[in-house]
Image (cartoon, rainbow, N blue to C red):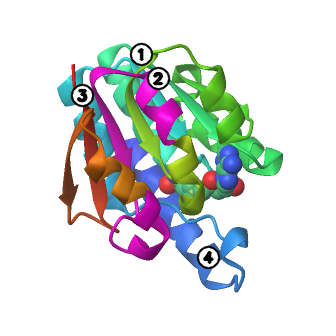
Amino acid sequence: MDATRQTFLDELYAHGRAHDEQREDRLQRLRNVEPETAELLGVLVRAMSATRVLEVGTSNGYSTIWLGDAAEAVGGSVISLEIEADRTAQAASNLTEAGVKEFVDLRTQDAAEALASFADAAFDLIFLDAERPLYAGYWPDLIRILRPNGLLVVDNTLSHAKDLVEFSELVYASEQVTSTLLTVGAGVLLIVKST
Ligand SMILES: C[S@@+](CC[C@H](N)C(=O)[O-])C[C@H]1O[C@@H](n2cnc3c(N)ncnc32)[C@H](O)[C@@H]1O
């Protein structure tokens, strides 16, 4: 990670924390991933040479910048989905300032609608970080659009385990995947699709 970009990310994260501390309403918060989770994403994209990356839940682009940085390193690109247009606009500004905008396609679109529109095996890595109760409904499309041996990364699996009961049951019952839970940040579930 370039030092200037890292400094920008540190400032963006601090801004996000300060912003969120002043908001009672969870949906008004930016809810950026913890820095160690963001770092993990950068490592995973590089380790897999994941050139086709999808993020579900852009917010103001903190994790997206980490993914864009990794996409630049491996010669790939990222599609990031966000339902709120003003957040996509904030993310566009932040990605431009971080110098990764050219590696990321920011889309203001509902995740369910977007996931249904992607081709089979379209992505090497998918990062899921939106509204957790909806994940179980996303499951068939997530598995369909992930390539064999592709990786699905799910945040908040420890911090919000109750929201993820139905989703976790689908994952653990599936014969199509292998998974492991990492105690990084808010708890990161790694799910690899079988060949
Ligand atoms: C936890 S935040 C994402 C944080 C971001 N990944 C980061 O680390 O900076 C979740 C985001 O998902 C967005 N979102 C919620 N429901 C969505 C949906 N159905 N489709 C797309 N985005 C959605 C929210 O507006 C919010 O900005």
Quadrant including the C terminus: top left
Of the residues tagged 4 and 1, which is closer to the observer?
1
Name the residue nearer the viewer: 175 or 48: 175
What is the three-letter code of the residue carrying label 3? Arg
Q: Which residue is mark 2?
A: 145
Quadrant including the N terminus: top left
Of the residues tagged 2 and 3, which is closer to the observer?
2
- Residue at 30% of width from left, 57% of height from top? 188
Crowding at dot 2, Cα within 10 Å, few <14 / some 14-19 / many 20+, comes out as many
Q: CA distance from mark 1 to mark 3?
A: 19 Å
Q: Secondary structure at mark 3?
A: helix
Q: CA distance from mark 4 to mark 1?
A: 36 Å
Q: Which residue is mark 3?
A: 46
Lower sequence index among marks 2 and 1: 1
Q: Which residue is mark 4?
A: 20
Q: Which mark is residue 121?
A: 1
> Do the residues under discs 2 and 1 have CB atoms within 8 angstroms?
yes
- Residue at 73% of width from left, 50% of height from top? 87
Q: Position of residue 64 (x, y in %)?
A: 51, 41
> Do the residues under discs 4 and 1 have CB atoms within 8 angstroms?
no
Lower sequence index among marks 4 and 2: 4
Crowding at dot 3, Cα within 10 Å, few <14 / some 14-19 / many 20+, comes out as many
Q: CA distance from mark 4 to mark 2?
A: 33 Å
